[in-house]
Amino acid sequence: MKTLLTFLKKNIRDYGILIALIVIIVFFQNRTGGILLRPINITNLVLQNSYIVIMALGMLLVIVAGGIDLSVGSIAAFIGAVAAVFMVRYNIHWFITILLSLILGGLIGAFQGYWISYANIPSFIVTLAGMLVFRGLTLVMLQGEAVGPFPVPFQRLSSGFIPDFFDYEGVHLTTILIGLLLSIFIVGFDLINRKKQKRYGFEVIPFYLMIIKDIIIVGAVMGLCYLMASYKGLPTVLIILFVLVILYAFVTSQTVIGRRIYAMGGNVKAAMLSGVNTKRLLFLTFVNMGVLAALAGLIVAARLNVATPKAGDGFELEVIAAVFIGGASATGGVGKIIGAVVGAFMIGVINNGMSILGIGIDWQQAIKGFVLLLAVLFDVYNKKRSSS
């Protein structure tokens, strides 16, 4: 028991947010009379928050690198508008539209990243300007009108579900199988990572604690898959999220470029003296952010089946809040992919739970702001405690 408490104390930044999410889920599950964890509501929760999670992955890298991006909501709206014009007015194939939209998102990120990285203009100023520019361009593209509907294959990007290859009545067996494969991957990756850490002399958690942690994670994964399997199975967008989360978790924790991003955010001068090309690295984080914002914009447009001038309003605030609530530091150099994902779903659960309870949007905004403030205060407290 003492070892467990010591472990939690040392890793409170990583596990505190997860415990908080569990507490919030239990609270709203109780207050809503079990509605929160019904399969149809979980599916809606995933669909409603997928774009926030996707952008949070990119925003985490930007914040870890020491920057900020206020333009992601406007970029998502602009890309959605461009995709709508391509498909509806010019009859461009939906797949080509997706490719062109992602490339355009990368170019937008490169445009902003150039001024931030090579012209040394603060990211706050550049992306604030970008927020206004791309919001205005969205209005220009749509001419103040909503454009839609879209081809059915494009709509499935957000509203589709993976097929059940077993065609078993009552339960979506393919979803259960995916859950099993994902659980095996998680446990295997944990064992390999632990073995690697021991080989290089790093401190590792006791084996029994790792087993407990993996049992909880596998239980959560299989429980989620079972609930989804009893409805329509896994949404297509959730598969996209799984792939992106695994990819970005690997890049940030297992690759040289990931370690360099953290080094740059922790101390940019030390990183430069170590031979890291900090300008190019910061530039690439904004290119990456542009691509993910474009993907989020496509998913939002596909979900609504229409592109509107008001799409993406306030997205940047929700994404930044998700990253900070997930444990990222406002000063850079600290933060994890899983934390950003948990932070995004925490905001989603709070939004969903309060909506079910009939709480107005005014109080929802106030409560989310209070949660964000608590997260930042928690970060400041941890820094003071570790430095003392």
Image (spheres, grey):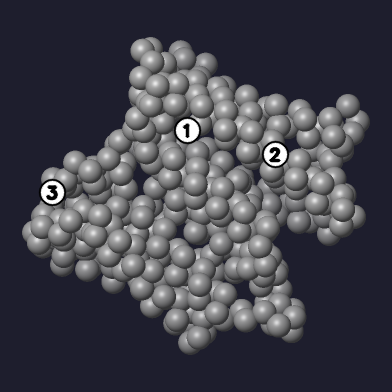
Q: Write down the residue under mark 2.
A: 188
Neighbor class of circle 2 (other Cα within 10 Å; few <14, some 14-19, many 20+) is: few
Q: Position of residue 60 (x, y in %)?
A: 55, 58
Nearer the camera: disc 1 or disc 3:
3
Q: Which mark is residue 234?
A: none
Q: CA distance from mark 1 to mark 3?
A: 30 Å
Q: Quadrant of the C terminus?
A: bottom right
| First of labels 1, 3 by sequence position | 3
Check disc 1 and report its element: helix, strand or loop: helix
Check disc 2 and report its element: helix, strand or loop: helix
Q: Residue at x 38, y 78 (%)?
A: 111
Asked whether residue 22 is in view, the answer is: no
Nearer the camera: disc 2 or disc 1:
2
Neighbor class of circle 3 (other Cα within 10 Å; few <14, some 14-19, many 20+) is: some
Q: Residue at x 36, y 52 (%)?
A: 296
Q: Write down the residue under mark 3.
A: 148
Q: Position of residue 184 (x, y in %)?
A: 64, 33
Q: Position of residue 220 (x, y in %)?
A: 59, 27
Q: Is residue 352 above or below residue 321?
A: above
Q: Write down the residue under mark 1.
A: 349
The three-letter amino acid code for the residue at tag 3 is Gly
* Relative horizontal placement of residue 334, taking residue 387 as reference (left or right): left
Q: Determine the image quadrant of residue 260.
A: bottom right
The three-letter amino acid code for the residue at tag 2 is Gly
Q: Is residue 80 above or below residue 277?
A: above
Q: Quadrant of the N terminus?
A: top right
Q: Determine the image quadrant of residue 85.
A: bottom left
Check disc 3 and report its element: helix, strand or loop: loop
Asked whether residue 29 is in view, the answer is: yes
The three-letter amino acid code for the residue at tag 1 is Val
Q: Residue at x 34, y 62 (%)?
A: 102
Q: CA distance from mark 2 to mark 1?
A: 29 Å
